Amino acid sequence: MATKDLEKQEAATPTKVERTHEWPTFTPPVDIVEQKDAFVLKADMPGADPQTINVEFEQGVLTIHAGRQTPERTGDVVWQEYREGDYERSFTVSNDINADGIKAEYVNGVLTLTLPKSEQAKPKKISVNVS
């Protein structure tokens, strides 16, 4: 068997994405919890426009993106700390995920993704025969 056949093939992940606009992009903070049958990812994305939320899973990379709504203002702005921009974050995900079962929900500024484990990744109970 050739050494080349034994080498692990990994998907090439771009290290930098070139933007075609000056719009800022924010990296949302994320919590990831492993459960028995799934991984649950919670991303804080306050102000995200629910109509623009996009979740993609391709070649082992999970990407979340959303546009952010600009708050309506009445009167003159005296001080402004809120910045306009988009949310975006990508993760390299194990092959142990059932891509067809991924679910997404956006409630109160938090995007929750449930990534179910594939059957081969779930823990198995092995019975022991006693003689």
Image (cartoon, rainbow, N blue to C red):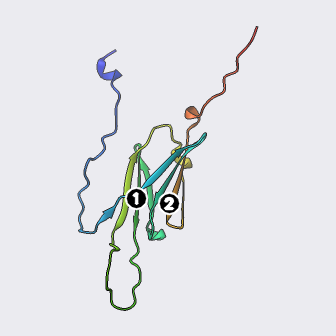
Q: In percent of the image, x 60 and y 31: which residue is there?
A: 123
Q: In percent of the image, x 38 and y 51: which residue is there?
A: 90
Q: Which type of secondary structure does the marked residue at label 2 adopt? A: strand
How far is mark 2 from mark 1, CA to CA?
Answer: 10 Å
Quadrant for the C terminus in the image? top right
Write down the quadrant of residue 22 in the picture.
bottom left
Ranked by sequence position, the earlier of labels 2 and 1 is 1
Label 2 sits on residue: 111
Neighbours of disc 1 within 10 Å: few (<14), some (14-19), many (20+):
some
Q: Is residue 105 left or right of residue 68?
A: right
Label 1 sits on residue: 28
Residue 69 or 30: which is nearer the viewer? 30
- x then y, percent, for residue 64: 42, 57
Q: Nearer the viewer, mark 2 or mark 1?
A: 1
Q: Are the residues at dot 2 and dot 1 in contact (C-beta closer than 8 Å)?
A: yes
Q: In percent of the image, x 50 and y 62: which residue is there?
A: 110
Q: Is residue 3 left or right of residue 43?
A: left
Badge count: 2
Which three-letter amino acid code belongs to the residue tagged 2?
Leu
Write down the quadrant of residue 119 in the picture.
top right
